[in-house]
Amino acid sequence: MTLAYRLELENVSKHYGNTRALESVSVAIPSGKIRGLVGENGAGKSTLSKIIAGDIRPTSGTMKLNGVEVPYLTPTSARRAGIAIVHQWGDLVPTMTVEENIFLGNEIHGSFRTLNKSEMRRRARAVLNELGVDVDPSLPVSELSPAHKQIVAISKALVRQCDLLIVDEGGVSLDTKETVLLHAVLRQLRGQGVTIIYISHLLDDVVELSDEITVLRNGALVETLDANSTTAEDLAVAVVGHEVRRPSREEATNDFSQRRTLLDVKGLSWTQDAAEFSLKVREGEILGITGPEGAGKSELLRTIFGLVPPTRGTVSIDGNTIGSRSPREMLNRGVAFVPEDRFAEGVLLDRNIEENISLPKISFEKRFFLPTTELRAEAVKKAAQIKTKMASIDSLVSELSGGNQQKVVVSRWLEDSYRLLLLDEPYKGIDIGAKDDINEAIRAMASAGRGVIVISTEFAELVGLVTTLLVIVNRKIVSTLTGPSITPHEIVRYYQYEVETPSPSFEGTSPPAAMS
Ligand SMILES: Nc1ncnc2c1ncn2[C@@H]1O[C@H](COP(=O)(O)OP(=O)(O)OP(=O)(O)O)[C@@H](O)[C@H]1O
Ligand SMILES: [Mg+2]
């Protein structure tokens, strides 16, 4: 029996000047299967998807849909051919409701050109029901969890009769439970004959979900693997091109109780339903914070940094209580913050990489007035530290791949003048090799006596890195893990306490020295 292919690409290339985003890639994707697509930041995954969806035109190559060669697609002809992309960011209008988003640009009209709202609500509900998710179509999208947002974006594609769905950066910033939900929806669609291309840096996820996995490296096809006989470790090797050794925990058992306290948070809270948070970060300490989506992790960090006004409690830096905190005040005291939503709060797409990396120096440290050659050299060094893939330091940030844009913003803050670095989800959209590079930079900061707080839902990164880990559920610290007790198994155990009260063993645990 010959396989029916939904999509075949032959020798597809895309060049931007001297940059070879894709070079002679040939892949064939069978109908009704889930094809994983992986590769380092800048490997060409999004370029390939955009070509399939008609958003960009390839430099050369041919494409077949259902065995028939087609001319290069436009967004409109791709949509007519049943192709849709769901991006992790954007796409949905946050202030509009679920049903309005699902039918945006594809509205159902009643008589006299009025909108048939009840019909749209009925169909929106039907699509969501069919996917087995319980979302109220009249809610604004801004109130949904990240997984539900992705599912709404998928529903929007489905009402347009899409049967070739590309999910670019699925799974990003989803916690364990939400990932399970997204996978269930995608499997259900596969069951209905939809062909899915699933792009992610979370290799465990890709192995778990896909039927076959295609690996790209530097714009070229490396191989396509059968997901059943592949492990996440095998896949990591295929992605980076050499053996990957996840660093082991060395510092984690160190005792920090004798070190100087950099940050001392006492009884801090920001809303009625949040508990009072107390924590300390000492010199050389890396404090991890994890917990399900919506648990209050970012709110806590933002309150510490002065972006959210506290309702009670104190924050001290170097033993001095800072009364009315503002981000500027905190920066002046050597505290830096990298927010989760870097696109809303930090990256200047129409400026070059050097300007983006040097931004904090230009805006906050004018008084030091560094000569431009020095700024440039520093920007080059920081970009190289986490292997930012770029044509040159003068390239516009808009020309970088998604993950490399994130690297630019993170690398801004990897430096000596901050004594305490607060990072909110720094690994989002970042490839496996670069995650190690970021962790390496964090460890170097800690060994030099600086303090770091890292929020992440990626346990695998935190386990090898942090000295103390707080698990936050429902705006409350439900567990403080230290040293050898920081294992994925332990973490997940506490994740479950979303409704139940914390376990007796937690109540009985005396807080470790670092958290006193
Ligand atoms: N408009 C553009 N101009 C110049 N180069 C570009 C442009 N768009 C993409 N590139 C380059 O093409 C290459 C592939 O980028 P692409 O976005 O496909 O990577 P990716 O695999 O999706 O990476 P990520 O995991 O970071 O999202 C990168 O080197 C990128 O800098
Ligand atoms: Mg991409």
Image (spheres, rainbow, N blue to C red):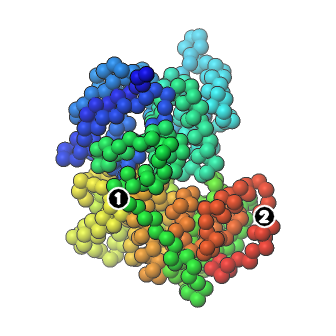
**Residue that carries the numbered disc 1 in the rendered image:** 242
Q: Do the residues labelled 1 and 2 touch (CB within 8 Å)?
A: no
**Nearer the camera: disc 1 or disc 2:** 1
Check the image and name the residue furthest to the left. Answer: 18
Q: Which numbered dot is residue 112?
A: none
**In the picture shown, does residue 212 fall above or below 177?**
above
Q: Can you give x and y, in whole percent of width and height, for residue 416 in the image?
A: 39, 76
Q: Is mark 2 within 8 Å of ligand 1?
A: no
Residue pictured at 63% horizontal, 79% vertical: 514
The C terminus, quarter of image: bottom right
Query: Could you say which is closer to the camera, residue 40 or residue 129?
Result: 40
Residue 347: quadrant of the picture: bottom left
Of marks 1 and 2, which one's residue comes earlier in the chain? 1
Q: Can you give x and y, in whole percent of width and height, for residue 327 in the image?
A: 51, 67
Task: Name which residue type carries label 1.
Answer: His
Query: Could you say which is closer to the camera, residue 393 or residue 496?
Result: 496
Task: Name which residue type carries label 2.
Answer: Ser
Would you call the spot at circle 2 few (<14 residues within 10 Å), some (14-19), or many (20 or more)?
A: few
Quote the CA–CA distance across marks 1 and 2.
43 Å
Q: Which numbered dot is residue 503?
A: 2
Residue pictured at 52% horizontal, 47% vertical: 205
Residue pictured at 69% horizontal, 67% vertical: 479
Check the image and name the residue furthest to the front. Answer: 1
